[in-house]
Amino acid sequence: MTQAIDQYLDAIWLEKGLSDNTLASYRRDLVQFERWLEANKGVEVLRATGADLLEWLGELARRGQSVRSSARMLSCLRGFYRYFVRENRISVDPTVNIDSPRIGRPLPKSLSEEDVDALLAQPDTSLALELRDKAMLELLYATGLRVSELVGLSLHQLNVHQGVVKVMGKGSKERLVPMGEEALYWLQQYLSQGRAELTRTGDVLFPSRRGTLMTRQTFWHRVKVYAQRANIRVNLSPHTLRHAFATHLINHGADLRVVQLLLGHSDLSTTQIYTHVARERMKQLHQQHHPRG
């Protein structure tokens, strides 16, 4: 019956143009199920029942496979059987009454307010390059911009008189984000004292050492340098300061919809993850400080 697997993979390659790696992953999942089915049930893969699939998913759980991997496996099998229903090779899709495993969304990694203060204190502002980094870090924490939005900023997107930055986010959606006094101060310091040493031409707000548009990877390298200086041992991600911005706002009582607008989320459900972060923080504080925690 591996012939059926070949037929299915050829079909979805033609329909969807999937990569070789994706097709290889699908093949592994399907062949793995096929072999288990033949060895334990003595039936061909196109004759599997819903009960067979549930037993297979249970076997994967006993082997210690993650919920995410099991969900991926079921998704692969679902596509496989739906294809053969359409082709009239089978009359019943055995996956039809099987729900996908619930995958909890991982909480974004954030920093404490003390860690943020330590990180932002690291750049040596007597150096033009580090003054630039100081302004970038302060702006990032004050606004919650995505790193790609930050490095792509141009001078005309700033309004220092009103203290706002105009951001073009995902889906070409424009939003105005207030900068706050601290970020605005360091931005003005950088514009008056540091930027001219990096470039005298162009509209790029935060140019690289060569005077060109900085990459996300370059900025992320700079963040890791300052985190090391500050002895921050949290496993950082490129969006750590964005997550800290949102978490700290909510910890201090900000309305969720306001945070949604500031972050540029199109859906409030995306922003709601930060309420869980704040709740986890409250649990930790309770356990740490309450006499019966």
Image (cartoon, rainbow, N blue to C red):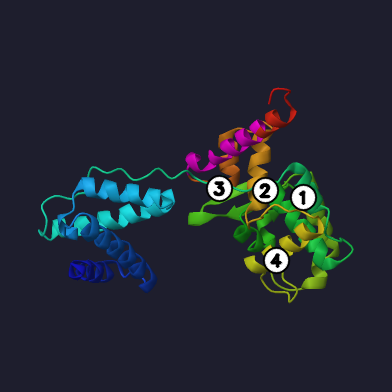
The answer to whether 272 appears left or right of 221 in the picture is: left
- In front of the other: 4 or 276: 4
Q: Residues within 10 Å of mark 4 (few under 14, many from 20)?
A: few
Q: Which residues are magenta?
A: 267-283
Q: Quadrant of the C terminus?
A: top right
Marks 1 and 3 close (CB-CB < 8 Å): no
Overall secondary structure of the magenta stretch? helix
Mark 3 touching mark 2, by CB under 8 A? no
Q: In this picture, is 27 found above or below 113?
A: below
Answer left or right for 164 relative to 47. right
For disc 4, the marked residue is 221
User: Closer to the camera, 212 or 283?
Assistant: 283
Residue at 63% in and 47% down: 243
Q: CA distance from mark 1 to mark 3?
A: 19 Å
- Assess disc 3: are there few (<14), some (14-19) or many (≥20) residues with their C-alpha within 10 Å of its C-alpha: many
Q: Is residue 211 left or right of residue 10?
A: right
Which residue is labeled 2 in the image?
A: 143
Q: Earlier in the sequence, mark 4 or mark 1?
A: 1
Disc 3 residue type? Gly
Q: Earlier in the sequence, mark 4 or mark 2?
A: 2
| Residue picked out by circle 1 | 183
Residue 264 marker: 3
The residue that appears at 56% across and 44% down in the rendered structure is 107
